[in-house]
Amino acid sequence: MNIAVCVKQVTDTEATAKLEPSSWRLDRSVTCILNPYDEYAVEEALRIKEAHGGEVTVVCMGPENATDAVRKALAMGADSAVLVSDPALAGSDAQATAYVLAEALKTFSWDLVLFGLRSTDGETGCVPGAVAEKLGVPLLSALSKVDIQGTTLTVHRETDEGYVAYECPAPAVLSVIKGINEPRYPSMKGIMSAKKKPLDIKDVGALGLDTTQVGLESAKTRVLSARSPEPRKAGVKVEDDGSGAEKIADFLTGAKLV
Amino acid sequence: MTQERDVLEVDVLYVGGGIASLSSALHLSNLVKAHNEQAAATGAKRLDELTIAVIDKGFSPGAHGISGAVMAPGPLKDLVPDFVEKGAPLEGEVKKESIFFLTKKRKLKAPFAPPPLNNHGNYVVSMSRLNQWMADLLEKNGVDLFWEFAGVEVLYDEGKVIGVRTGDKGIDAKGEKKPNYEPGTDIHAGVTVFGEGSRGNLTKELIAHLGLDQGANPPAFEVGVKEVWELPEPRLQPGEVVHTLGYPLKRDTFGGGFIYGMKDNMVSVGQLVSLDYSDPYLDPHREFQKFKLHPMLAALLSGGKLVQYGAKTVPVGGLYSIPQLSFPGGLIIGDAGNLFNSQKIKGIDLAIRSGMLAARTIFDGLVTDDLSETTLARYAKAVGESAEVKDLRKVRNFHQGMTKGLYLGMSKAVLQFLLGGRDINDRLDSKPDWRHMKRVTEKYGTASPSKEAIGEIDFDGKLTFDKETDVYYSGATHEEAQPPHLKVPDLNICYGKCTEYYHNPCSRFCPAGVYEMTTDEATGQRTLQINFSNCVHCKTCDIKDPFENIQWVPPEGGGGPKYTVM
Ligand SMILES: Cc1cc2nc3c(=O)[nH]c(=O)nc-3n(C[C@H](O)[C@H](O)[C@H](O)COP(=O)(O)OP(=O)(O)OC[C@H]3O[C@@H](n4cnc5c(N)ncnc54)[C@H](O)[C@@H]3O)c2cc1C
Ligand code: SF4
């Protein structure tokens, strides 16, 4: 079973996020990491490969330095990678990203496409659905379990009440949630061998992309304004000397919350 | 997920990816490249497929790099002659410099910077940024860089160092293996170079194991607490340098403040406090917050924004505290070898210089196929003969002279300066920092000193911050599901003697609020809570605990602060 895993490089969730005031685009000069949700997707892909054979290909759209995130996925054990990188793609919104990824996915054959639930910076969670639509295959999102028998997938889709079990034939697009597995750590040997694995960097021309569909100008969404959240304020500490519950109740009524 | 321990064979291994190791690996890879190019022409023996590896516990290049910093550029110029053209991240050249003596409300300007603090022609830099830049050069040279890997054990074969073991990953709080357990790797190396920085955990073990500190003074340290701020308008030129003495430190505590201008209206403000202080209630983080309350700083920072926080120790023991720097199988470079000039507050130049000399020695050994102890010993000799270390000779008793506090120390320092480093009876002895702490009753004449006597303040959240807020700005995080990496072997000491004598100073000397003594009101049961996730890896606790009852060991690789502009 050949699997494509789509990953994104995001700004570190620990770093203070900064926006460029002119475009409201995220300043990506800070520490960048592989989107934490995508680590679960990579891990799931590797587990499927280990159980059923096949190859894992990483697909990423991002600036040139996104190779770091891609290399991490390779160091974890993926076999090869495609990075679509072009200045013309900067500022692309979720729609445009899905278009680019779908076009990249059309250049090789796969049975499953895996995504993390969403990116920690954009937080839209729309890309997997849009890619499935563009590829014309079913979407199974927010999965906490994936089982494979032959070419049939049995999955658990997490909901507020519990989970729904679905059965679906491959090919399909899947997005997985945090906790579906424990992503492995890249080993030193993995990191060394990742340097030698094929990483194909493609620009807009190489993929034959329609430039009117990508980039900031063509984005169908516009950010009108943005602001930083209020700085955290120190909370109230309630010491429980037996009257803890009472004190919390007093606090909540005092704040007119109950 | 691998259950078996990998063994990785490399030619040269650097433990710690600070400026010392990065410079050394860069120099070595440059020498090898030049050699191979020449060999192609002359038919000499090539050094093919040489593996040079660097491991660092930080998340990414520069993540654990923190300094002031004013850098003397000499060694960097030797390493990368066109560093300016190559885009080295320099904040600014030092063109303006002043030194002030502060009292609580006033400042007294020295008419000129005393020669040791004359920084004209030096550069203000950010260590995190410089390390990132260096790491990029190394990548291009094909050096293998491994971030998120901590060295946890030195590997010996008889008396010879043969490499280092990295830490296991995926161990939960109870010490059990998680599903993603990944055992550490045994890295075997022809030469292992220790560039772990101040109070390196493996270096400490290595020095003890091989007796490398025989005849040396015990090391001595200062802790630097620092913040980078962004100002609303230009108030300090990039490259402008201000040093201060006096307020807020009490007279018997040695240390000083610094203010360095960076690019983009940023400033680096910080304070160094000597860890041979005696006051069990001293809190270096609080003293730094007080420093910012001085009218000069309050005005500078008003309307500004805190960008990043950090803390780290520096080794200030000077010439006599330098251990033997070479041993069978390896070398020690940079701060790990206590190569620091405390009077000039300079370590970056020494780190680069020692790194380059180590590279030269290793290269010679590789070419002649002789990496014996005798070959490696040439490094220690070369370090001793370098201009930077000869400089240390002149200030060899500076810190020991200062241990009596600022005023007494100053006169001794002046004397030393005039005598060219010689003190009356040449070598001042010193005892380790942890032995300098006095009991609360001895220090304050009472077992319950007042807030005023201690010098406590309230933090306003605008100019001054509590440890919790500051730690947030250091980016420090650790995988929570792991055993604490601060080992306190004997808790009875904490609840007994340490409480009685010193009132648990760990809750104060740690600049990240890692140690908290909590009391259960119902039972009166006290618990030492270790918030290890806050740890910024400064090593103060490993140095200053009055019972030597705290041992810092590396947490799972990748944990710790995430500095980008420090
Ligand atoms: C507040 C402050 C102000 C300073 N001001 C100046 C100044 O103005 N000018 C100046 O020249 N110098 C200054 N210094 C000193 C200077 O920063 C140091 O001398 C220099 O950083 C030393 O470099 P290094 O590579 O030896 O060590 P470090 O920079 O400490 O690097 C060591 C690296 O090794 C890693 N490491 C440690 N142990 C392990 C392990 N077991 N496994 C894996 N990785 C490990 C650490 O994470 C770190 O990245 C200052 C220092 C401080 C703290
Ligand atoms: S726990 Fe120790 S090493 Fe960590 S921040 Fe506190 S004093 Fe520094």
Image (cartoon, coloured by chain):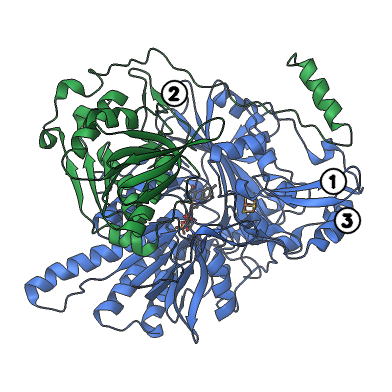
Chain colours: A green, B blue
Q: CA distance from mark 1 to mark 2?
A: 48 Å
- In the depicted view, which residue is nearer to us: B168 or B248? B168
Quarter of the image with the C terminus of chain A in it:
top right
- In the depicted view, which residue is nearer to us: B357 or A161? A161
Q: Earlier in the sequence, mark 1 or mark 2?
A: 2
- In the depicted view, which residue is nearer to us: B278 or A7? A7
Question: Badge 1 is on which residue?
Answer: B519
Residue contact at pointers 1 and 2, CB within 8 angstroms: no
Callouts 3 and 1 in the same chain? yes
Within the image, what quadrant is residue B219 found in?
bottom right
Question: Badge 2 is on which residue?
Answer: B234
Tell us which disc is closer to us: 1 or 2.
1
Residue drawn at x 35%, y 50% as measured from the top left: A45
A137 to B312, vertically: above or below: above
In this image, A63 relative to A118: left or right?
Answer: left
In this image, B80 relative to B343: left or right?
Answer: left
Residue drawn at x 87%, y 48% as measured from the top left: B444
Give percent across and percent down for residue B175. 62, 62
Q: Is mark 1 within 8 Å of ligand 2?
A: no
Mark 3, Cα crowd under 10 Å, few <14 / some 14-19 / many 20+, is some
Question: Badge 3 is on which residue?
Answer: B500
- The secondary element bearing badge 3 is classed as helix
Q: Is mark 3 within 8 Å of ligand 2?
A: no
- The secondary element bearing badge 1 is classed as strand
The amino acid beneath tag 1 is Thr
For disc 3, the chain is B
